[in-house]
Amino acid sequence: MATHKLLLLPGDGIGPEVMAEVKKLIAWMNAHKMGTFETEDGLVGGAAYDAHKVSITDATMAKAHAADAVIFGAVGGPKWDSVPYDARPEAGLLRLRKDLALYANLRPAVTYPALADASALKRELVAGLDIMILRELTGGVYFGEPKTITDLGNGQKRAVDTQVYDTYEIERIGRVAFELARKRRNKVTSMEKRNVMKTGVLWNEVMTQLHQREFKDVTLEHQLADSGGMQLVRNPKQFDVIVTDNLFGDMLSDIAAMLTGSLGMLASASLGETNPKTGQRKAMYEPVHGSAPDIAGKGAANPIAMIASFGMALRYSFNMGREADMIDQAIAATLDKGLRTGDIKSEGTTLVGTTQMGDAIIAEMERLAR
Ligand code: NAD
């Protein structure tokens, strides 16, 4: 059995607390011969600043490059509010994304049956929801040049951001979208603004051509990003995989997140290029939430987003779909039993802490493995 090398970067605040539950799960999987995982811990964010005065060291970056996957907790907190800008905790996360060239951001929006009432939308619209928002992460208007504010000298200033995409950037994210759809319900919805933006025209053209050339078996539809946002809250179950650019993806993935309830439930993956020699993709897996300083150290954090992010690593880095499904089922079964951390607590359910939630999920894994 191949050994999977994981770099664990717990970070700050609740990061180490939720990562501890993933460590327990990894130990359980190793003990049950469900994969062979080798793990190494590293510092990132405020924790790295306290030790080394940087948000991530070159040595840790080298380990991230060498790992089969990086599992990231969360960074930041008021303690580091006044550190130099380049050493702020978030800079460590941005460096990881940039240096590993993680251009594809996967944000599943899944509503567990037991939590359908926690959504901002009506139960019938979200019960059973399972969609994937795929956001281009390294291009577009957040990075395009010029990016300036110029003093016009007449009491006015002019701010410029540049939305720019090359064919290859659209093609590679499109390829990820179609490949994902083939393993799901075989449908991709591409969202852009071709009615008012040249990048939208090119995005639409490249997606259409890629589909014709390589993915005719997958259904492709196009929606303008604004009406796509509307559809996402009107009838989210019409979608399977939504693929979109960096800016629209930023907004649409947050909208989709709210369909599912709490931040403590949301997992994500960021993928880079595949190494042609090993077939291995650069990849980092992290919960969507931050370091939650308001509850850090209280043992109250919901570990499900972190555990589900590890589940995504099994699915997308290690081709362990069966084991990833097991984790999802164990989470669903734990919720069905009525166990809830504070963020997802509702009437008639049982309040538990971080470790009890982690233990309960592992107990369900144990039951499913029998
Ligand atoms: P946050 O996600 O940390 O917290 C927002 C709210 O959600 C808080 O009330 C928090 O208690 C709650 N929450 C978040 N995760 C939870 C969980 N797993 N279980 C239970 N409740 C949970 O966002 P914020 O408060 O805006 O930011 C706090 C810090 O985290 C800041 O320093 C921010 O820069 C940083 N941050 C980091 C990341 C990251 O590391 N990827 C992402 C967002 C924010």
Image (cartoon, grey):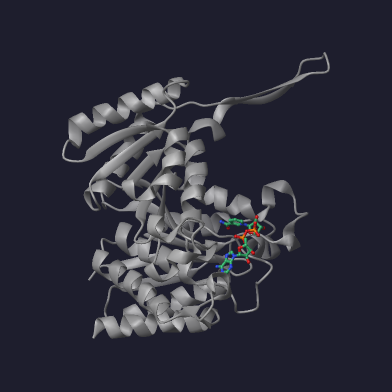
**What is the residue that sits farthest to the left in this orientation?**
217
Residue 100, x across and y down, in percent: 45, 48
Percent x, y of residue 114: 41, 71
**x 28%, y 73%: residue:** 35
Question: From this viewpoint, which residue is outermost toward the top?
Answer: 154
**Residue 261, can we see it?**
yes
Q: Nearer the viewer, residue 240 or 327?
A: 240
Pick the front one: 99 or 21: 21
Q: Which image quarter is the N terminus in?
A: bottom left
**In x, y percent, where is residue 308?**
41, 66
Residue plotted at (33% across, 80% down): 365
Please count the marks in the image. Answer: 0
Residue 327 lies left or right of residue 20; in this view the side is: left
Q: Residue at x 32, y 46 (%)?
A: 238
Task: Examine the rendered structure and indicate whether residue 227 appears above or below residue 350.
Answer: above
Q: Position of residue 106 (x, y in %)?
A: 40, 50
Above-or-below relation of 307 to 185: below
Does residue 102 show up? no
Side (left or right) of 186 relative to 306: left
Which quarter of the rendering shows the C terminus? bottom left
Rendered view: 54 above or below 9: above
Question: Where is ligand 1, by quadrant?
Answer: bottom right
Q: In this rendered view, identify the residue nearer to me: 335 or 302.
A: 335
User: On the image, which quarter does residue 338 sit in?
Assistant: bottom left
